[in-house]
Image: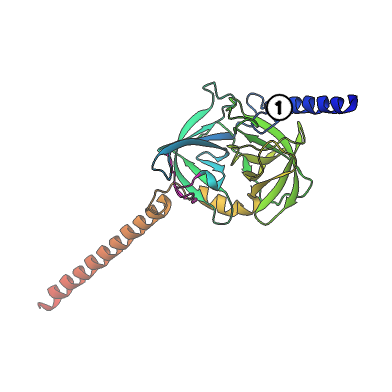
Amino acid sequence: MLRPLTNLLTIVLIVLAGAQPAEAVAYGEDAPDGDYAFSARLTMTGIPTEERGSRDSWCSGALIAPKWVITAGHCFRDADGERVSRTVAAETTATVGRTDLGTSAGHEVRVVGVRQSETADVALAELDEPITDIAPLKVGSTAPEPGEKVRLTGYGLSGTGDSTPERLQTGRFVVDRVGDTVLEISGRAPRRDTSACPHDSGGPYFRESPPVLIAVVSSGPTCPHEGPDLSARTDNLANWITGTIDDGPTFPGTTPVRVAVGAALLFVLLVAVFLARSQHRGTRRRAAKAVTGV
């Protein structure tokens, strides 16, 4: 009877030891003050629901240009759960450069627009004002390789319960498999079950020296867990990302401002040419009339 009791005691001790709260980016570690300042939290207040009510939520992301944050596409869904190229909440705010959410460091900027990738669970959130004192995370254009070591940052939930961490969390990961649009990425440090949690969606996986984005958190098993999560590749979206952030601001139902301004200038030029030609023809008629007396 002693051995069964000993085994039971061992199981109880293991269960109790495993019941310790996990931090966001489960079993990750606190990000040092000032590190990974490009990391972003997208806070959504008043998201419509199917029951005609509303809810609040948030995602993680990264600043990739002064007025653009990259995140997961599913962070912007309508009441039917469909991804949409617009903000869905009554208010969406990007907090950037704030390692400790209990402080006033960094920036809080309103999100005014969204662009959805057509091929991956990736979205770009457009900011109302540029953030110019934080270096954006560079978007890589070369494919990751299996075995490559990367880092993740995020503002997601803790691994157990519903507690919301007040500090940016981080961990180190390894690329297991490279697919056409997704990567399988597993935790390595501080523990092998370091993993992304709810609200880490959109958090950046990046090479560290120098920091270069390769993917954003998309989906995975319940955290914490060993083995891979699925992340959305970004290297094969580099041209779309560059084209989008270079096109300037857009608003629902309109063309990009740069295109609209170009069209307006072309219209003014055509009117000027028409008027000039009309004036020239009128001058010629008056000259002919003066000569012939007609």
Residue in front for this viewpoint, 7 or 193 = 7
The verdict on residue 40 being magenta is: no
Q: What kind of secondary structure does the magenta stretch mostly adopt?
A: loop
Can you say which quadrant of the picture contains the C terminus? bottom left
Mark 1 surroundings: few (<14), some (14-19) or many (≥20) residues within 10 A: few
- Please provide percent x and percent y for residue 76: 49, 45
- Please provide percent x and percent y for residue 132: 52, 34
Apparent side of residue 229 relative to residue 271 in the rendered image (left or right) = right
- Please provide percent x and percent y for residue 95: 52, 31
Q: Secondary structure at mark 1?
A: loop
Apparent side of residue 277 relative to residue 254 in the rendered image (left or right) = left
Query: Please, which residue is most extreme toward the left here?
Result: 293
Its colouring scheme is: rainbow
43 shown above or below 175: above
Residue in front for this viewpoint, 285 or 17 = 17
Identify the residue shown where x is 13% and y is 78%: 292
Residue in front for this viewpoint, 17 or 180 = 17
Apparent side of residue 92 relative to residue 236 in the rendered image (left or right) = left
Instruction: Please give the range of residues in magenta.
Output: 76-89
Identify the residue shown where x is 66% and y is 33%: 25
223 shown above or below 184: above
Query: Please, which residue is most extreme toward the front here?
Result: 1
Q: Pointer 1: what residue?
A: 19
Asked if residue 6 can be seen in this view, the reply is yes
Quadrant of the rendered structure where residue 153 is? top right
